[in-house]
Amino acid sequence: MQNARTIHSPVNRDDGVRETETARPFVHVLADTSDKLSGICSILERKFTVAGERLDADAKLSQVELRDVDNIAAIKRRAGKLARARKRIFLVEHTSHVGISQAYALGATHVLPGTINRIQLLAVLTDPADEASAPPNGTAQPDNAVETAATAIASMFACATLGQPLEVEATKAAGRKIADRITQHGLSEWLTTVRRHHEGTYQHCLLVTGVTIDFGLSLGLGRRDLERLCSAAMFHDIGKARIPLAILEKPGRLDPEERATIEAHPVAGFEFLKGHEGISPEILDAVRHHHEYLDGSGYPDALCAASISDVVRILTISDIFAALIERRSYKPTMPRTEAYNILCGMTGKLEKALVASFKQVALTR
């Protein structure tokens, strides 16, 4: 079962204490046990001014179980007080899709799995890119499309993991918010924000959706076609909810059995979604076939050129590009120019004209 390990919230102080330019950043730490609280505070005290408190104020709980209604209510009460924090970091034990989904739904901007990793935690807290793009006085961003989309994807993964019905319209609405955000601010801003605040599969889904939307905009697609493409991108990797995180997040090369498990996700996503109203056959086709190649070398059905729809062709290019440029703890972010060159080298697998059209998305938009 998933437990909330700790929550770290860097905030601008508004308690009457005026910080000078030389004052250290302020971090609020919540933990479910005294030992965890002490451990986290000891890591942070050399670089930050730290305020710590027990999440279970009455000290009646040995751990914070995220499936417990009272615990969720307690976290929400605390999160409301810390809503102005630019970073809300959850450290979670025994990571699962459901636990990570719940953390994002409860307001996390970052989720760090596993045991306390001093280097990783400090890297997130001191990321200079956050300060460079932060709004003045700690105010929230006026457009919360990233958090809305992350919550929708987290909810989607939780439903798939638990076998519960999906809120299709809520997911589509989140996709429309992404489209509005990218239309107003551009793709680069979206990529930077997502990579800074989200990890792993959730980061990938957000990146793919953003890239796919911008590709559709660059192609001049009409509103209905763009919404269809956006929905396909939002739903495309839902089958990964059935794959253990240990395989999804493995830093090294997958063995044949693990590779087979990964390659089962398009069919798993298709099977989960096909019983839902509001998901068109075209979107289902994209979910099942976004790893197919024109030369028949893809999976799961080894389709060839004539059998692969335009939506799938666009989504596949966007999916590969997003996978190459995403940020993971075990690999650096690949420059967009290098990622685009890899697409250009996939002769016979991707539609040449679409790859050429994708150049402005990859390099200049």
Image (cartoon, rainbow, N blue to C red):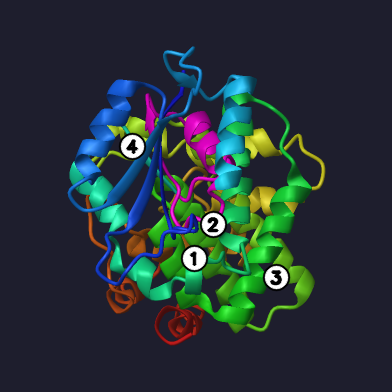
Q: In percent of the image, x 38 and y 66: which residue is there? A: 130
Q: Are marks 4 and 2 in contact (CB under 8 Å)?
A: no
Residue type, mark 4 in image:
Arg
Q: CA distance from mark 2 to mark 3?
A: 33 Å
Residue type, mark 1 in image:
Gly
Q: Earlier in the sequence, mark 1 or mark 4?
A: 1
Residue 351 visible, this angle: no
* SS at mark 4 in the image: helix
In the displayed structure, 91 sits above or below 119; it is above
In x, y percent, where is residue 192? Answer: 41, 69
Q: CA distance from mark 4 to mark 3?
A: 32 Å
Q: Earlier in the sequence, mark 4 or mark 3?
A: 3
Q: CA distance from mark 4 to mark 2?
A: 42 Å
Q: Are marks 1 and 4 in contact (CB under 8 Å)?
A: no
Q: Which label lies toward us, 4 or 2?
A: 2
* SS at mark 3 in the image: helix
Residue type, mark 2 in image:
Arg
Chain part drawn in magenta? 82-109
* SS at mark 1 in the image: helix
Q: Is residue 357 left or right of residue 324?
A: right
In x, y percent, where is residue 46? Answer: 17, 49
Q: CA distance from mark 2 to mark 1?
A: 6 Å
Q: In percent of the image, x 36 and y 49: which residue is there? A: 27
Quickly name the residue at label 4: 259
Quickly name the residue at label 2: 84
Q: Which label lies toward us, 3 or 1?
A: 1
Q: Which label lies toward us, 1 or 4?
A: 1
Q: Are marks 2 and 1 in contact (CB under 8 Å)?
A: yes
Quickly name the residue at label 1: 138
Q: CA distance from mark 1 to mark 4?
A: 44 Å
Quickly name the residue at label 3: 226
